[in-house]
Amino acid sequence: MIEINLLPPEERIRQTKPQPFLSIGIAVTAIVLAVMFLINITTFLRNQRQIALLGESLQSVRTKSDQAKKLSDHLQETLRPEATLIRSMLSNEINWAQVLGNISVHIPSNLWLSKQELKDQSEGWTLTLIGLARPVREESAISSVGEFTNKLKNEIETILAKDNIYADIELLTTTKRKMADRVEIVEFKASYVRNR
């Protein structure tokens, strides 16, 4: 194939030289693309670093949240029985001041208490009295304990009946004989139980 150029010689030389405007345009475009690439890479790396920091912060917050939940659960489990007891005492369910007053009114002079314990749980409450009794003249210590615990059982039932609360009270009396100074002393435990 034969190529024939019919342009004058000046035009032929000009056409073979690269156009400066085209070279400048290509160079500017390349520079702009390189700057944009660098900006994008910098932004990407900065965002990656922030995401990593936020991930660490989130993990720290989760750990602290788990610790707070465990502490909250522990406190609820520990304080629930006390809260139930306080709620029960503050409610009109049982007038505990009246019950304790009846204990002091009905306790005979030859009987004394060494321990009183009240357990109030969701299934019911138990009032336990532990004490000692000694015989008086013709009355034995065991009969004194029986008389006292029966009177107290009747009084508690009366208090519960006033509040229209169903009472399932069971009396458990255990006796243990002790010899002290040649006097028979009976140790007893009376439990008054009410199921809810």
Image (cartoon, helix red, strand yellow):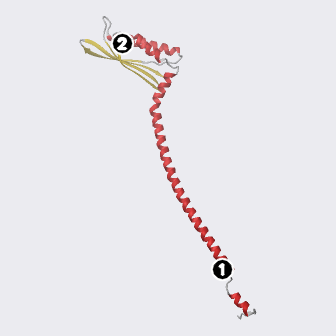
Q: Residue at x 51, y 14 (%)?
A: 161
- Can the viewer see residue 178? yes
Q: Position of residue 85 (x, y in %)?
A: 47, 25
Please tell me whether mark 2 or mark 1 is closer to you in this view: 1
Which amino acid type is shown beneath numbered disc 1? Ser
Q: Which residue is mark 2?
A: 145
Which amino acid lies under the numbered mark 2 shown in the image of this protein?
Val
x 45%, y 18%: residue: 169
Counting from the top left corner in percent of width and height, residue 55 is at 52, 53
Residue at the far left: name it. 182
Q: Earlier in the sequence, mark 2 or mark 1?
A: 1
**Residue in the image at 51% along x and 56% along y:** 52
The answer to whether residue 42 is above or below residue 13 is above
Crowding near the residue tagged with mark 1, few <14, some 14–19, many ≥20 C-alpha atoms within 10 Å: few
Nearer to us in this view, 165 or 132: 132
Q: Which residue is disc 1 drawn over?
A: 23
